Amino acid sequence: MASGNTQSPSARAVVEGFKNGLSRQTVLSLGACVHCGMCNDSCHYYLATGDPQMTPAAKTDKVRKLYKRHVDWLGRVAPAWVGGATLRTDEDLQALQDVVYGSCTMCRRCTLSCPFGVDTALIMRTARGLLTAQGFAPEGVKVVSKDQWEIGNQMGVSKEDYLETLDWLQDELRGDVGDPEAMIPIDKEGAHVLFLVNPREIKYAPMSLLAAAKIFYAAGEDWTMPSVGWDNTNFGLFSGDNKLGAHMGKLAYDQARKLGIGKVVISECGHGFRATKWEAPNWAKEDLPFPMESFLETMVEYVNTGRLTLDPTANPRPVTYHDPCNLARSAGITEEPRFLLKRSCLDFREMTPNRQENFCCTGGGGAMSMSEYAQRRLQVARVKADQIRATGAESVATACHNCIDGLSDLIKHYELKVPVRNVCEYVADALVLPAPAIARDALIPTGLRGKRVLVIDDDPDTVVYLTTLFEDQGLDTVSAHNAAEGMTAARTAQPDLITLDISMPGRSGADVFAKLRSDEVLARIPVVIVTGAIDFRELMYRRNVPPPDGYVAKPIDPELLLMTLRKVLEVRHREGVGSGEGAAV
Amino acid sequence: MPTFTHGEVSIEVDEDGFMQEPEGWNEVVAHALASTEGVDDLTDEHWKVVNYLREYYLQFGVAPMIRKLCKETGFNLKRIYELFPSGPAKGACKVAGLPKPTGCV
């Protein structure tokens, strides 16, 4: 059409790039919108301002008009009829930049409420990529992208400064855990875990990295940090520049391959996790030989396998959790942080809405690096501030460095006076560090050391709790989650003692107990009942079999339980095998 | 570009409240900026941090690593955050008249 002659070179390049480079998913999202308005109330920009121009449909229409004008068949014939229009001037490009960079954090909350699944963030990223290629991007995004291209990390940290910082943190770690041998290993070949961080942790706020090092130390992990390719963040995701996205991914992947590590663990950064694990392998066209996971997943595994012991009394004040968009909505990580916080804090409170429905921290999509839009960002943060205030929590946990800064800004602006920290910092507070090896061994009562306990309980949390408690006392443990498993394990593992829950699905614990007691071989194994169903106690003792050797009520008092075990095992030891007379407590 | 006014002080700042022209900084400006950071009184300890940030910035054109800041001032991390509740990047750098640090902060 006639537009070609009057277009600025940049506008022409954006339009040509748009026509020729649309992905199938972008076309679907551009074509599917029927302007039904279902997305309006999902967007914090609209909720806080009430401005119809701030609805997701209106904002994406600024890009959609290009689709209507240049791609849609009807629009190519009669553009005005379908709302098609093109970009002509650099002012048009600047106006588009203000929309796609300045009024959307690419949080994808609106996608959940869209009947067609229109991915607004994808539309925004497509437009951002075309604009960025022509130099239309916020200054902060340009600076950070340049640092990632040229220096390999978003804060321009030199290798020397990076290594010196890790050396310093290693000293801090040693002081904190009281072990002069504690390490932050660098480039350790063949390590099980390669840990990648957000440069914010190196340059300004290393508390989360120190917490992570403590957790790795407590879990006895074989871990390392890379000397290059350590930045898990990726501004390619925000600026739409797939080449930068691939470059940042490759820096990390190449080092991981070179070191021959077992798995890559990504520190608590929402977009860093999404970019490194899910997006950059595609941008870099890489088929990677190692798995990648969020540090949240790693910590959960440590707790579940008894490698970490947590004491929630370390964090007694009310805490809430903010779900980062890139973890909850884009990567499905919602339960891991809750699992960890509930075990590290006494008073955990949900924010409403939460998980995939949570509102953005308002700093997503690279917004924290765009000062030009800071006032609008703080204005629309009212939605988030109200949400935090309603929890009554005295501190906020989140699993994203960008969220920490976004939330800290709005908390200051709306005078909420609550600190924001990473999940791993709460976990590190609650760590029960192993006592030095010799002293610990000496503390274990001889009656317990080396004995094997079978834990039968249908609640996985109780199993983890009990096995951890017992192993800390030098006991060997085996666990079973139902009656059938319990009977099998009693036969195969030859335990010295069994702890048994009586209310389990399927055959009840009481039946298991009767069966154990009636079995010629198994009858001699002492059984301690551990249950919340205290009313069943009488039934248990009324059975026509020798009574249990001990009885401990839930919620479990660990001291009482251990004392019961010790008594039972010591009595057994003195009497030899076979007594039914135990130490019922 | 917004103008930040506090008492006699009137300076150009960016949308995040950081100074646009760091050469216009002086002690009176520092007091004015500190008021926006919940720091009512600048003590000798605050000045130690602020002066180091300023010197480093004038020499190298960027904010120093937290490691250098701790080493040169002798304060540990916790103390820095007590002095400047918004932290070294957004709190201390702002009071010292540095432009906003780059990146996700």
Image (cartoon, rainbow, N blue to C red):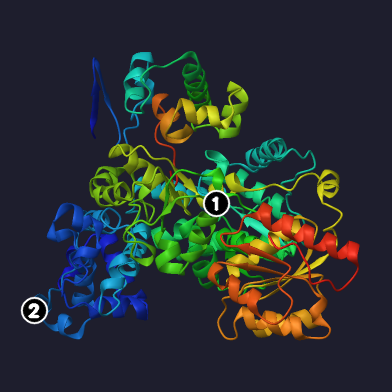
Which numbered disc covers residue A109?
none
Describe the element under mark 1 as helix, strand or loop: helix
Q: Give the position of the C terminus of chain B as an image quadrant.
A: top left
Residue A337 point in image, percent of width and height: 50, 59
A549 or B19: nearer the viewer: A549
Location of residue A471 by image quarter: bottom right
Describe the element under mark 2 as helix, strand or loop: helix
The residue carrying mark 2 is A81
The residue carrying mark 1 is A344
Question: The residue marked by circle 1 belongs to what chain?
Answer: A
A100 or A569: nearer the viewer: A569
Label 1: how many residues lie within 10 Å, few (<14), some (14-19) or many (20+)? many
- Residue depicted at 61% across the width and 22% down the height: B74
Give the mark nearer the N terminus: 2 vs 1. Answer: 2
Q: Residue furthest left?
A: A81
Name the side, left or right, on which A72 lies relative to A248: left
